[in-house]
Image (cartoon, rainbow, N blue to C red):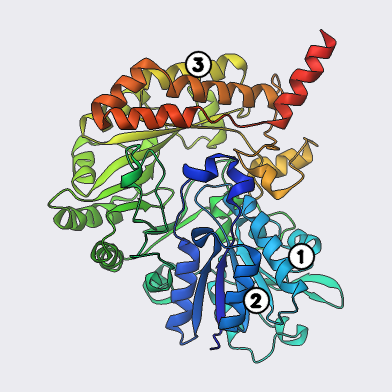
């Protein structure tokens, strides 16, 4: 059996999530592998998907599958379920790529993903097992590569949107365009759902986050994720989501320079939801960074989903910002569509800090009022906060935590601000000579060697310790646990308490405390 291209999702979970990887971290379908595979298949190329993460495959098992499929091109799709995952998943991707090269597999290896898009030349220079990199989403680049008979440097120099080596020199070709709005349904024509691995039934190797499953293990699978749009119109300094839209060859890509949104048509996306429904998948994440932003797209889709969800079977979640939620009747429609959770980017309890990181586009809103409106509509909230944003002090961080306890949302997620490659904070950190993570896994918010940013008044270790202490305090808080028990039952409460017992080890906190104990 021989195919044109194999899309590979690496397995990096153990180094990225520590002990949380055993039972608690989500396992999400590889959205971009599915999109790229279907796009290439629509152009009559033979495609396959190897999801090492879902199947928990080691390098030897992956190599055996690759030999069976005999792909002309190996495409590592290095994204993931969180904004930092494009960097942290480089761990497993590079390890597997090195193993493939050591075992003399001749198929060229191409990498696509957010870290690669941010730092294409650095990727090539650092990783000798990578032959080609994509400098943006790679849709047209992959089509054109697969039309080549050979992948030699003479042919590669004519392919737009890649980096490659020629005479031991790393080179970038001119940028390739991203799929324009009027070609979305045509050139990104859906998801290759049928190529995903399974155990006994479709999507049973994938599991939702605990909170999405109402903290009950039996609700986690089958699980799927889908996008109705790509990109974001905002340019927040901590985010790198728009790096997929890159259209230049600067040495360091900054996502906020490429703010842009593209949408599939309502009819097209609804058909994809219907496929998932017919597969028996009711627990679904809507991946869009800004699902509830453009009513032209989300209102008609929610209306169609409401008819599909007449028995209230769907358990979906979507992202929104607190300043994009306006009318109560819209929230009622969203809830009837089966969206039972909204993930809100509150970020900070300090208005000035919110305005700074969102470049003035975060409107002044009454957060308490918005959260109350969402709860009154029957929708639960996963509240996102970030500690250590520019301007943060111990007082502002404590105020943010105080606000979070007052809001008492049934989901609470807080990260220490990280200089993620592709974000404006990353480039600023380089310019200010801040200490940055040394390894890919160190960019994980949950890893032992994680390295957040400092602020003018706080060491990274102090910020991280506040975050970890607040995580435990929030999830063991009586008001929170009483609300969980009332809403989801005693078992959900027990699961949260068991999850809270897992203490993440943090090297910078250990070093900081050792240093200050020796001084005292």
Query: Mark 1 = which residue?
Result: 124
Q: Residue furthest top?
A: 520
Numbered tag placed on residue 419 in the rendering? none
How far apart are the alpha carbons under marks 1 and 3? 44 Å
Residue designated by label 3: 399
Visible residue check, residue 460: yes
- Residue 17: x, y in percent? 58, 43
Q: Classify 10 Å Cα crowding around label 3: few (below 14), some (14-19), many (20 and above).
A: some
Task: Count neighbours of disc 1 (C-alpha within 10 A) and say few if under 14, some if 14 to 19, many if 20 or more.
Answer: many
Mark 3–mark 2 Cα distance, whole angstroms, equals 49 Å
Q: Is residue 336 left or right of residue 434?
A: left
* Residue at 56% across, 34% down: 357
- For the C terminus, the quadrant is top right
* Precedes in sequence: disc 2 or disc 1: 1
Label 2: element kind? loop
Q: Quadrant of residue 380?
A: top left
Can you tell which quarter of the image residue 134 is in?
bottom right
């Amino acid at each position: 059996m021989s195919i044109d291209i194999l899309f590979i999702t690496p397995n990096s979970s153990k180094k990225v999530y520590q002990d949380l990887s055993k039972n608690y971290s989500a396992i999400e379908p590889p959205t971009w592998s599915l999109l790229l595979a279907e796009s290439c298949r629509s152009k009559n190329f033979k495609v396959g998907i190897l999801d090492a993460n879902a199947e928990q495959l080691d390098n030897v098992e992956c190599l055996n599958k690759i030999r069976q499929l005999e792909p002309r091109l190996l495409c590592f799709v290095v994204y993931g379920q969180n904004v930092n995952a494009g960097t942290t998943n480089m761990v497993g991707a590079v390890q597997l790529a090195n193993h493939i090269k050591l075992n003399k597999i001749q198929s060229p290896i191409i990498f696509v993903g957010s870290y690669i898009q941010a730092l294409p030349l650095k990727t090539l220079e650092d990783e000798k097992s990578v032959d080609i990199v994509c400098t943006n989403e790679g849709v047209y680049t992959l089509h054109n590569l697969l039309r080549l008979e050979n992948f030699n440097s003479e042919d590669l120099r004519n392919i737009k949107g890649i980096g490659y080596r020629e005479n031991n020199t790393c080179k970038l070709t001119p940028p390739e365009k991203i799929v324009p709005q009027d070609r979305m349904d045509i050139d990104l024509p859906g998801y290759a759902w049928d190529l995903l691995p399974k155990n006994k039934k479709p999507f049973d190797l994938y599991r939702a986050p605990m909170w999405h499953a109402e903290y009950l293990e039996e609700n986690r699978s089958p699980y799927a994720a889908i996008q109705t749009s790509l990109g974001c119109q905002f340019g927040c300094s901590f985010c790198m989501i728009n790096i997929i839209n890159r259209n230049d060859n600067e040495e360091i890509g900054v996502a906020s320079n490429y703010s842009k949104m593209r949408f599939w048509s309502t009819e097209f996306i609804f058909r994809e939801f219907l496929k998932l429904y017919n597969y028996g998948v009711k627990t679904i994440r809507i991946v869009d960074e800004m699902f509830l932003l453009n009513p032209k797209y989300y209102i008609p889709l929610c209306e169609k989903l409401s008819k599909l969800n007449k028995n209230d079977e769907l358990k979906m979640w979507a992202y929104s910002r607190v300043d994009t939620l306006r009318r109560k009747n819209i929230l009622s429609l969203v809830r009837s569509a089966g969206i039972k959770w909204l993930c809100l980017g509150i970020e900070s309890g300090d208005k000035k800090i919110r305005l700074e990181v969102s470049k003035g586009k975060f409107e002044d809103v009454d957060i308490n009022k918005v959260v109350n409106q969402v709860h009154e509509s029957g929708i639960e909230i996963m509240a996102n906060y970030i500690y250590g944003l520019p301007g943060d002090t111990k007082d502002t961080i404590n105020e943010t935590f105080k606000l979070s306890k007052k809001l008492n949302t049934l989901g609470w997620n807080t990260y220490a601000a990280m200089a993620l490659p592709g974000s404006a904070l990353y480039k600023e950190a380089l310019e200010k000579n801040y200490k940055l993570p040394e390894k890919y896994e160190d960019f994980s918010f949950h890893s032992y060697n994680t390295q957040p940013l400092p602020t003018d008044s706080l060491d990274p270790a102090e910020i991280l310790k506040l975050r970890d202490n607040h995580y435990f305090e929030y999830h063991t808080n009586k008001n929170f646990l009483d609300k969980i028990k009332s809403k989801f039952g005693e078992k959900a409460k027990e699961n949260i308490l068991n999850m809270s017992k897992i203490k993440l080890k943090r090297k910078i906190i250990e070093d900081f405390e050792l240093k200050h104990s020796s001084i005292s």
